[in-house]
Amino acid sequence: MSRKFWSLLLAAILAPCAAPAMAADETEQGLATLWEVLWHQSGTPTRIVRWENEIRLRLTGVDLPQHRDYILNALRTVTDEAGVRLVDVTDQPNATQLANLKVEVTPDTALEDNQPCVTYLDFRSEDKVDTASIQMRSRDVYRCAYHEGMHLMGVRGHPAGKTVLSYFPVKVDGLLPLDRVMLRAWYSPRMKGGMTPFEALPVLADELVATMPDKATAAQTRDRFFASTMDQMQAYAAGKGDIPSIVKRSGKSTDEGIRRGRSEMSYFLGVAYFEGTTVAVDQKQALSWFERAASAGNRGAQAWLGNRR
C-alpha cells in the first residue's frame, strides 16, 4: 500500500484523540486571555468597572465626515453586545452638557506613534463608570475604534489572545468571538461593578465554556486553570512569583505598580477564600491573606479586619 494511504489511516486513527486536546488548548488560551484582561499594564490587577446607565456620545475633532459612520458603527457594535444603550447627542445644542462620553479625532501629528489612541475612564468609586473620553488620530481610526470601544466598556487590559484589545490583533475592523464573550460576561446579571478578579473570572470563564462545542472538556480545563492560577497568584502575592507575562511584555509595568499589585492580590486572595470564589472557602487562608495585605497598607484589608474586631 502507498505511503499516502498509511498517512491517511494514521491521521484517521489519531483524529479522535487529537480533538479533545485541541479543544482543551483552545479553552486554555481563551481563559488565559480572560485572566490577562483583568490586569492593568502597570502590573496591578483591577476590579470590574462598567456603565450602569446609557452612554451619551459627543463626537468632535478633525475629519469627522470621513470617520463618523465608522466610529458610530464600532461603538454601537460594542454597546449592543454589552446591552448598553448608546445615544449620539453630537448635533444637539446642549451636547456638551448632555454627553458623558467625548470622542475626539485628533490630527495625525497629535498623540504618540506608540499610542495613537487612548481611553480615559472616570469613576468616583472603582465599580461604575461615570464619564469617559476617547482620543484617536485620524489616520488610525480604522485600527483604534473597536479597540478603544472595548476599553470604553470598562475592559482595561491588553491581553495577548485573539481579541481587538491585543497590541497584535488578528483583525482590527470588528469584534472577535472572544471580545463578544468578554462583553456578554462583563454586562451579565452575574457580574457586578467592583468585583475582584477572582470573583469576575468564573463569570468570564463560564461564558467562554458555553461557546465551546465540547463543554465537558472545556469545564475540566476551566477547573484546572482556576487551580493553577490560584497557585501562581499566591506565589505572586507572597513575593515569590511574577505578574502575567503579557503585562511584562507591554513594557509599561513599573516597580510601584507591581508592588501595589502584590498588595492588591493579597487582598483579592483573602476575598476569594472568604467567599469561595474560584477556590473552596477557607477562613484560615482568608484571614492570613487579609493580614498580609493589611500589613502592606491595603485599605480594603485593613477595613475588613477592623470590622471584625
Image (spheres, helix red, strand yellow):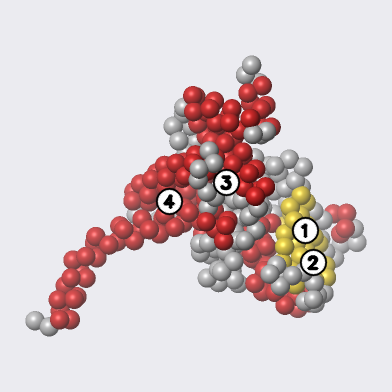
Which residue is farthest top? 309
**Disc 4 element:** helix
Do residues under tags 1 and 4 come within 8 Å of each other at their CB atoms?
no
Percent of width and height locating residue 293: 61, 33
Which residue is farthest left? 1
How many angstroms separate mark 2 from mark 3 (CA)? 29 Å
Local crowd at mark 1 within 10 Å, few (<14), some, or many (≥20)?
some
Q: Which residue is mark 2?
A: 104
Do residues under tags 2 and 3 come within 8 Å of each other at their CB atoms?
no
Between 149 and 280, the one lying in front of the other is 280
Q: Is residue 300 above or below residue 176?
A: above
Q: Which residue is mark 3?
A: 188
If you read the primary sequence from the N terminus, does the residue marked by circle 3 or circle 4 appear first? 3
Percent of width and height locating residue 174: 59, 69
Q: Residue at x 38, y 58 (%)?
A: 25
Q: Residue at x 65, y 43 (%)?
A: 260
How many angstroms separate mark 1 from mark 4 (CA)? 33 Å
89 sits left or right of 173 in the view:
right
Q: Quadrant of residue 306?
A: top right
Q: Residue at x 71, y 73 (%)?
A: 113
Q: Is residue 62 above or below residue 159?
A: below
What's the residue type where badge 1 is placed?
A: Ser
What's the residue type where badge 4 is placed?
A: Val
How many angstroms separate mark 3 from mark 1 (CA)? 24 Å
Q: Nearer the viewer, mark 2 or mark 3?
A: 2
Between 118 and 15, the one lying in front of the other is 118
Q: Is residue 226 visible?
A: no
Q: Is residue 48 above or below residue 274?
A: below
Between 65 and 164, the one lying in front of the other is 164
Q: Which residue is mark 1?
A: 133
